[in-house]
Amino acid sequence: MEDLQKLENGIISGIAAQDTLTGLEDLRVAEVGKKGHVSLLMRELGKMTAEEKKEFGPKLNGLKTRIMKEIAARKDELEAQELNRRLQSERIDITLPSPSENSGSIHPITQVMDEVAEIFTELGFSIAEGPEIEEDFYNFTALNIPPHHPARQMHDTFYFPEDEAGNRKLLRTHTSPVQIRTMMSGPPPYRIIVPGRTYRCDSDATHTPMFHQVEALVIDKDIHMGHLKWCIEEFCRKFFDLNDVKIRFRPSYFPFTEPSAEVDIGCAFKDGEILIGEGDDWLEIMGCGMVNPRVLENVGLDPDEYQGFAFGMGLDRIAMLKWGIPDLRDFFAADLRWLKHYGFAALDIPSLSTQKSGGRSPRDRGSSSSPKGGRPPINKNSGSK
Amino acid sequence: MKFTLSWLKEHLDTDADVNGISEKLTAIGLEVEEIHNPADDLAPFVIAEVLEAAPHPDADKLQVLKVNTGTETLQVVCGAPNARAGLKGAFAPSGATIPSNGMKLRPTRIRGVESNGMMCSEQELGLGDNHDGIIDLPADAPVGTRFSDYMRMDDPVIEIAITPNHQDALGIYGIARDLAAAGIGTLKAQNITTIKGAFGCPQKVVLENPEACPVFAGRLIRGIKNGPSPEWLQKKLRALGMKPISILVDITNFLTYDMARPLHVFDADRIQGDIVVRLSKAGETLAALDDGEYTLDDGFCVITDDSGVIGLGGVMGGISTACQPDTVNVFLEAAWFDPITIAMAGRALGIDSDARYRFERGVDPETMLPGIELATKLILDICGGEPSEVIVTGEAPVISKMVALRPGRVNHLGGVNVTKEEITKILRRLGFQVTKNSDLLDVIIPSWRCDIDGEADLVEEVLRIHGFEHIRSTPLPPASRDIDTGLNAMQKRVRIAKRSAAGQGLREAVTWSFLPSAQTRLFAELKPELVLGNPISSDLDAMRPNLLPNLITAVRRNMDRGFKNVALFECGNQFADDTPAGQSLILAGVRRGQSGAKHWNSTPKDVDAFTAKRDAEIILRAIGVKIDNAQVVAEAPPWYHPGRSGTIRLGPKNILAWFGEIHPAICTALDVKGPLVGFEILLEDIPLPKAKNGNSRGPLKASDFQAVERDFAFVVDRDVTAADLIKAVRGADRKLCHDVTLFDVYVGSGIRENQKSVAISVKLQAIDKTLTEEEIELFSSTVIANVQKRTGGILR
């Protein structure tokens, strides 16, 4: 037999010297393949005596095992080197831009409607809608605003031409006609909010001929002004994302409610910004009251059995307050720069489970019209070319 | 409504300061809009004495004054002709702002002479019209004293907003009464003495229309001397921003503000014959006190004499019988006019007067005689003269009525516990008469509260005086019966549709519901019932019959700003007529340019009809339409390109959406450079899912056996549609045919002129086995046969 130790040393150093996978494979075949060097040595065992077998058998087997192990280890090494080389050669400039579709957006009016719907759904309300071209009866008369009432002057109404019967339709001046339609279409109790487009013949820096309102109506047996107050507080707390909200009721007048109140929310006016939930100033945000018994009678309800409240506010206005949007007129201009700046992502669907403002300190909970809580004003330059 | 603190205190005994009063006013529903103290405007102005007045070396009309301001002596160049040594007047130092013109003073040189500060005229201080010279105060005026202190100008003017139900607060006395009821001081009793007439009233009054004017009182006062009002009266009116005119006019204005009682004074010598109060006839005219010439319609309440109309009752008097400086005999009138008649006339003629403002909200009829007496007293005191007896023609309307109040209603409606005693006290302080009637309170409404209609109004009265801050916030109880909450299926659909559109790169816009009527004609016949009678502008005069035109013009505006690629959508109502059924909710979108930005690795595609089709299909799928069950047909409304548009429908009568390229003529008419593509989804016409199986989707039937794909290329005539071809392929074996994809359309060399080659890939799969080669072959030949039979197509 050859000097096995010498043989092993030669083969092991041969393995280590291989720097390609094919070279290593050739070596493997040459040494431990079927007709390889070591295999031929093992074949010779058959010609040996029992004693010789006893001595050389384990030696040869050990030799083969060690060689195989060395080859496998070297193979792993070479493969890893090979992969590394490939990966290096495959390097790309990952800072190149990905192919992008133009992204779309949701208008703040839709977003604010969805938020409001979410909050009132949790309070047990459903959403009612109605026609924008209305009859005088639903928009005024049934709401206790008879012809010539001075309150009609508070509504700059858009009218359509008179028909043969002398009636003229109008564009609803508020969402309140839907209260009447709802109450006339089924039995109480009612718990609805009514979002939608409304129209007044008015156009200046703070008024547009079309705007949006949302109003709420609750009619049941024992509803009183305390429930109204709670409801408004809950809404403001959730909408403006405040733990604590200061609300002030001021006596006011609306023909369709009695008693009536205007609602102010605590705020601070600082450097031309409105910070909701801070300071000692007040900002009027909505009108409300107990539904006037005349209105209940007009829809055939007994005011001694059913009573409730209604409140209404400008959706555009609360959107402006919440997100710091300065100019109402821009809402309706369809300016891509504005839509991009103030719009919302398609999947940013308001949900109460994600609305809470997490671990901010109470001091920071003010929702504001400032860059802090809202969005900075849009910088209108030219469009992208 | 404006008033001064001092005027208020003539009726209200109170220690409260202006802030306390202001807070309470707002708390009881008389919202304070502004508080302005005129003394604040004149804070730096002091009384100064002219020590010397010398001619200006370089100007004839100017003088150089040495002025003692009390603290220093300054040189002032002055152009007033009455400036002289010894004069005491109002001095404005450098740094002060002149109220009338906002000019801020600083040391200057006038024609080469140094000048520090200014001696002021009345007009410059906003105290009157006099600008002939500087203010010339009495010799005992204390030099160095603040001018506003000396003039007692420290009297805040409070302006409150008046809601239509607070006609009683259109007089300062009424405001004082409300404040007293709310615990701010005590109401002072009005001192009204009846002045006995010296002779019978010779003026006859006839009321022809008792609905419009049920009562008319008057008295003749003869031998008076008119002229400018005394200073106290002028000052009162000026403080409220009114211009003093003459004693007689100023007295009526004074009482209008003091007790919400409009009155009128005629020059009795210019009234011809009897006064007849009647309704106007169309065409009658009046030269009114505001210098307007008005032509009247039928039905206004007018005061007439033999000469014709001499006044619009309760709105404005006429020039022909107006008092003049030389008037000696006057007829003083106080009447009551129907609010609706007044409002109608005022609105029709566009006259806003203090009288109209009060009469259309309801004047207290019981102030008629007190008003006459107070006015008489003032006229006699200031102008002298001799009064006749008062004549009253007609009868005053009765405002007072009884309303029963259940004391528990305050809590049940208002959510505040107020005791019966407290309720009674509050109402009495407001002037209501309250008597107990077993469990009820019988409440008699005072004549100045015509707004009180029923029990709810009384609850409001109690609440507002007791304080709205006491209303206790109470969680809403569960509804007395189970009711729906949240979004209904349609509302949920709208929400998903909008967000799906935004997810495809369209930006949501909200555009006007109206547009120029010329533009509506591009989309529908212009219906007169959809054209506004009083549009805000001619550009916004018709209700939109379609959402696209406003979106298309928005594309144009954005292109003008430099955007080449525009993708917008809107979800809103469009109007086919003026009925509720004519209103339909649509989601429409438009795209222009390319669907993506320039990119290093991919070329952006121009938008085309298929972009719009894809938009529509994705949204439809998002809102639950099984788009594979819908048909696409090559028909669309005329605002689409006739060869590049389509309809997605479930059947001929159930259209879900239109899409395609916008007709080039529409683009031209709306002045936008195309091509433009768009789509409209008829959200309300899509059937709602039937809740047949509830929410269950049934078990999944998935095949575990191998699917195979086979590709076919057919040559067909050009006018064979893809839909027909796919239908023919699918019809070969609906069970095996799992999926059909059209992946190539080829025209050109190798294909005849009027033909095209269409490549289709079919995925085959059986639910129960792996398909054999024979079965696949059989399917293929059926496909080929079917395509040939249905479309004439030949396998290429």
Image (cartoon, rainbow, N blue to C red):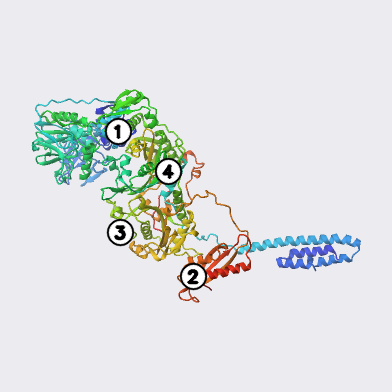
Contact (Cβ within 8 Å) of mark 3 with mark 1: no
Amino acid at pointer 3: Ala
Is B789 or A83 nearer to us in this picture?
Answer: B789
Mark 3 secondary-structure assignment: helix
Query: Residue A73: image x %, image y %?
Result: 73, 60
Q: CA distance from mark 1 to mark 4?
A: 42 Å
Mark 4 secondary-structure assignment: strand
Disc on the earlier residue, 3 or 1: 1
Checking the image for residue B453, the label placed there is 1
Label 1: few (<14), some or many (≥20) within 10 Å?
Answer: some
- Would you place residue B222 above or below residue A185 in this image? above
Amino acid at pointer 1: Asp
Instruction: Name the residue tied to disc 2.
Output: B791
Left or right side of B516 for A33: right
Left or right side of B227 for A183: right
Label 3: few (<14), some or many (≥20) within 10 Å?
Answer: few
Instruction: Name the residue tied to disc 4.
Output: A368
Amino acid at pointer 2: Thr
Instruction: Name the residue tied to disc 3.
Output: B518
Q: CA distance from mark 2 to mark 3?
A: 45 Å
Disc on the earlier residue, 1 or 2: 1
- Chain letter for the residue marked with disc 3 in the picture: B
